[in-house]
């Protein structure tokens, strides 16, 4: 299956997917098993950019209960000049107090020594169970072991080492043809549950060998995250640990300058890659069977809450799972998001079939609708009073597999 | 099983549960099958208070997509002088436009004629599928048939006729000993899904033969609803149709005067009855296995959002279902409700066992905790910075039965 496989993401013409993967020039990565996860699964990832002039940008969860690695990375690194990332899965190092902060600092220190970079250039991330101290001996041994395994094509192991309940891998390598030359873009991500539209509730690491200023990294990452990871919801749950990093090694010697056609082309490639990865997270959705897109148009202040209410509605999500055209649950979610506004003139279309006009049912082809909602991707369009505002969210269904995964996934 | 069977509701000393049921003096009720539900199930209920001086009060959902019967009852009745209620299940008469309003008006008219009361004294309620016109011939025939079946002990059939996905009946009859004499209180309710803490997302009809002014009805209903149906969540979904009615026939000749001991005694009985009924709705919770109570203490503005975030978290709810002491999901939900507040000093106790202090894990008796979270009722206590605010919510788990019910319950 090709990386760009959703009708909701267009593969940019300038972009070529590299079927065998590979990191951009300047980067090396590794993933090892250090014993945090049971059964010898890969659980520690290390990624380094060798050029000292590497630039970067980051986005983090806005949770009030941030994990120790997020607190540390925000406070004790230079976010525009990161050169290495050390990540473990199986334990989030969250709700672990001062000991957790000390453990995150130890991870940062070990990775800095192992990679030969300054501590302030090392980002730390952890994902997994909350409220359990990290097994630091294992983590330190794993970090040193990973440093010996660093390879230019090590992103497959790195991507595997950062995953938790993910059902499939989430990574891609692209070539982007710019006027100034060809650059590479690659991404490795994890995420399936605890995914909410308020931010990129997952770990995502993006690399390029284009030359970008730190400001340009930050600008591009901000715009593309707002169109990808901020627009997905598996279960409306905001994580303690979400981290998205973009690193640019500059090793291709191809510079992307602000306000040029190359900036637009590069931005389109990054945008498509992150939207597709966000859709992969939504599809994984801890057992999800179907993915939906909701598009809400109307007054600017109301479109966002309505889209979120629909995407997070357990009734809409179970109907999506059941392949059920129960649009009454969509109008229920719309009404819940706008208390006191009755009677509300709302139009609803599912897969282009209008089922509700001005708040009332509309005769429609029920057989065609039933067939449409049983496909893998289902689109809901909602029109509210007013205009000028548009909100888009991608979300997954709620089914037995989600319950099984989350009722049995124990501390 | 006694009606008062939760440790979270104390049966008032002045109250006696009537094991054989029965309506207060002055009331008659009936439930018939008119053909809205398949298979001959009861689906139309009628309730009337014969004394012309009957007083009443009502509360409704705040949804922006109100059902036709809610719009009609709010706009075209005297809410302080209701004498009859006509209810159908199997079809919510919501998202049905002008035809829906006309149909609700026809239901009101038929019931008024059949019961011999003014149209403005008839409340209308409908519950079931959204977006499908009512079969009015069946409804009208059913209303007339129900009028012939009205009985002083007809509340069992009435209660059955208003239910949809409910797994068990929700009704009670109490005797309350006041200084001025003994009065009766009875209640019939329905509700299992589409239940949110924002309001009484269900249908509940309360009767008493005490003499109460309409103002007193409104005051008592407002206070007791805010402590019962506004504090429960099955799935965080606000319905289009929620209606709670209190009717006082006065037929006992026992007057409840404002600011007297009898008012307090009567209020306590009503409060306990509605809290217990709200807990029954939570327990029913479309397949729920366990019920939880979350109690949040701290600054007034933050306790409410935190309680709701915990109660509506699909991760907390699946852990509750699994009997899993995964308190990391509780701290995750707390952090999600208070973005930007990290690091947050939060304490968490489950069934009195403290697991988190000042935002960090606390060593505890894991075996005792594991046993505690596998009981039918689980209590979470959360202490946040500040004081003066307390928020309480009851909620149900999220399990396979909820998915089965909601993925298969088709339009």
Image (cartoon, coloured by chain):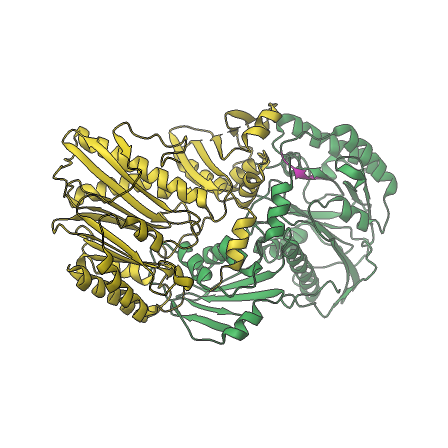
Chain colours: A yellow, B green
- Residue at 43% across, 43% down: A282
Magenta-colored span: B124-130
Residue at screen point 83% across, 59% down: B20
Question: What is the quadrant of residue A144 in the picture?
Answer: bottom left
Task: Identify whether B156 is placed above or below B130.
Answer: below
Residue A368 vs B25, above or below: the answer is above
Q: Quadrant of residue B334?
A: bottom left
Q: Is residue B129 magenta?
A: yes
Q: Position of residue A130 (x, y in %)?
A: 41, 63
Whether the magenta-drawn stretch holds residue A144 is answered as no
Frontmost residue, B181 versus A197: A197
Residue B144's x, y, as percent?
83, 35
Give coordinates of residue B384: x percent, y percent: 42, 65
Q: What residue appears at the point 19 percent right and 37 percent down from the top-left corner?
A: A183
Q: Residue at x 70, y 29 (%)?
A: B103
Q: Is residue B326 above or below residue A310?
A: below
Q: Position of residue A177 (x, y in %)?
A: 21, 31
From the viewer's perspective, is B5 left or right of A6? right
């Amino acid at each position: 299956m090709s990386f760009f496989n959703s009708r909701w993401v267009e593969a940019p013409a300038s972009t070529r997917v590299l079927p065998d993967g590979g990191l951009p020039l300047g980067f090396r990565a590794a993933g090892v098993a250090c014993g945090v996860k049971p059964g010898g699964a890969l659980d520690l990832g290390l990624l380094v950019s060798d050029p000292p002039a590497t630039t970067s940008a980051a986005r983090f969860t806005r949770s009030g209960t941030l994990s120790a690695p997020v607190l540390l990375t925000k406070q004790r690194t230079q976010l525009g000049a990161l050169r290495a990332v050390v990540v473990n899965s199986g334990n989030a190092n969250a709700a672990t107090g001062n000991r957790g902060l000390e453990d995150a600092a130890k991870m940062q220190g070990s990775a800095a020594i192992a990679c030969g970079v300054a501590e302030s250039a090392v980002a730390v991330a952890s994902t997994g169970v909350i409220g359990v101290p990290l097994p630091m001996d294992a983590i330190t041994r794993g970090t040193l072991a990973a440093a010996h395994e660093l390879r230019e094509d090590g992103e497959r192991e790195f991507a595997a080492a950062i995953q938790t309940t993910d059902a499939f891998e989430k990574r891609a390598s692209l070539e982007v043809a710019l006027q100034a030359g060809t650059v590479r873009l690659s991404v490795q991500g994890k995420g399936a549950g605890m995914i909410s539209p308020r931010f990129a509730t997952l770990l995502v690491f993006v690399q390029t060998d284009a030359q970008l200023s730190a400001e340009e990294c930050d600008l591009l990452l901000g715009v593309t995250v707002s169109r990808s990871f901020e627009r997905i919801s598996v279960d409306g749950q905001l994580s303690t640990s979400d981290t998205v990093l973009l690193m640019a090694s500059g090793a291709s010697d191809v510079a992307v300058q602000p306000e040029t056609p190359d900036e637009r082309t590069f931005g389109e490639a990054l945008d498509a890659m992150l939207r597709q990865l966000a859709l992969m997270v939504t599809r994984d959705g801890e057992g999800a069977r179907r993915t939906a897109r909701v598009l809400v148009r109307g007054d600017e202040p109301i479109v966002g809450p309505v889209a979120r209410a629909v995407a997070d509605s357990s009734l809409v999500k179970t109907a999506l799972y059941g392949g059920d055209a129960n649009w009454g649950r969509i109008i229920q979610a719309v009404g819940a998001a706008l208390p006191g506004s009755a009677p509300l003139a709302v139009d609803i279309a599912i897969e282009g079939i209008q089922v509700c006009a001005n708040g009332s049912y509309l005769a429609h082809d029920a057989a065609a609708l039933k067939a449409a909602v049983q496909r893998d991707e289902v689109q809901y369009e909602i029109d509210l009073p007013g205009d000028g505002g548009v909100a888009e969210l991608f979300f997954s269904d709620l089914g037995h597999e989600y319950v099984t995964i989350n009722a049995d996934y124990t501390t």
